[in-house]
Image (cartoon, helix red, strand yellow):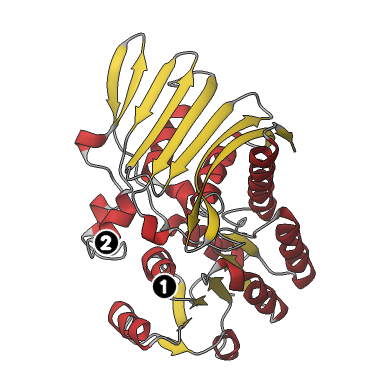
Amino acid sequence: MSASTPSRIGVVGYGAGGHRFHVPYIQAVEGWELAGVVTRSPQRRAILATEAPGVAAFDSLDALLDSGVDAVVITTPPDTRRELVLQALERGVHVVADKPFAPTAEGARELQAAAARSGRILTAYQNRRWDTDLVTLKQTIDAGSLGEIWRVSSRMDQDDSGTLETGPAHGLLRDLGSHLVDQMAFLFGRVERVSAHLDTATVDGVDVDCGFDVALHHANGVFSRVASSKINHLEGRELIAYGDLGSYESHMDDVQTAQIDAGLRPASAAAATDWGIEAEGRWGILHTAAGSTAVPSARGHYSEFYRQFLAAVRGEGPAPVPLEQAVHTVEILDAARESARTRRTVTL
């Protein structure tokens, strides 16, 4: 495929994920043509017509595929995602699967095998690898400012009980936990041992995990801990990294989501200079023997996922999230659930 010819991509599902976390970032990448969106809802079709004028709405994945696309994004609820991913792979297109990539490691490996049989790219939408605070932390670590990293603590509390999903494929660990665990595995590599606690509440008559604290022992010796809550009326984000030269502390906001919710779009001219950059008053602080210094915000940009996915589809680079990494994240989540159930550390 010529680099000058747009690659056609479709989005399946246009709830909060589709119109807040996918379509705006696809539109921001030159080379992608948004070919259509699958949604039957009249209300969501109206939103689509406003946010992506001229983009066709389809009733089904098959109808979208029949229109001719190179790739699709599956961003429907978790309990419908598996069948749609398999269907798209069988039809011979590349696939982005939203998180959680699969409800269990067994299910993740099934999708991995299906992708291998199809010869098409399957990747997981772990967009929070491009969060502003994580990109800034990674740059700080890569610059050697902290020396040898010993441990990292990551907490993301959301006062948002209305979005806590229930059911066998849901829960906060599978939802937000997929991101926080993936971030640590992305920074520090494979995890060997997991110890976890889950908070459980009854929501709409169903027991569901609504909070978690998960300790991860990485193969390279780094220790990381991720934690979150959703029904404890607490809102806050914290990243703290400890190394032999000092520490780094960040309380940055969820910058890109706030910009989307404010009506901004990454493809706009106004976003060229300030998209994904935290306000100076919220910059992280580096503490070393030389003193404490504010670290300028790096630029977070979820569209980087779609830039890398486009390159992969065109045979010009690897998938933005290699499939084995997506599977490993689900293995970690399985181990966390087992650890919470047995009250033991689980070895992967």
Q: Residue at x 24, y 36 (%)?
A: 282
| Residue 143 in sight here | no
Mark 1 or mark 2: whose residue is earlier in sequence: 1
Please give left or right for residue 242 compared with residue 316 in the image.
left
Q: Residues within 10 Å of mark 2 (few under 14, many from 20)?
A: few
Q: Nearer the viewer, residue 315 or 22?
A: 22
Q: Residue at x 45, y 83 (%)?
A: 39
Where residue 84 sits: x, y (%)?
Answer: 63, 76
Give the quadrant of residue 335. top right
Task: Label 2: state its secondary structure.
Answer: helix
User: Which residue position holds label 2?
Assistant: 261
**Which label is found at residue 315?**
none
Q: Residue at x 67, y 55 (%)?
A: 323
Q: Report how far apart the C-alphas of labels 1 and 2 lie in the structure.
A: 14 Å
297 or 206: nearer the viewer: 206
Q: Quadrant of the C terminus?
A: top right
Q: Vertically, is 117 above or below 92?
A: above
Q: Amino acid at mark 1?
A: Gly
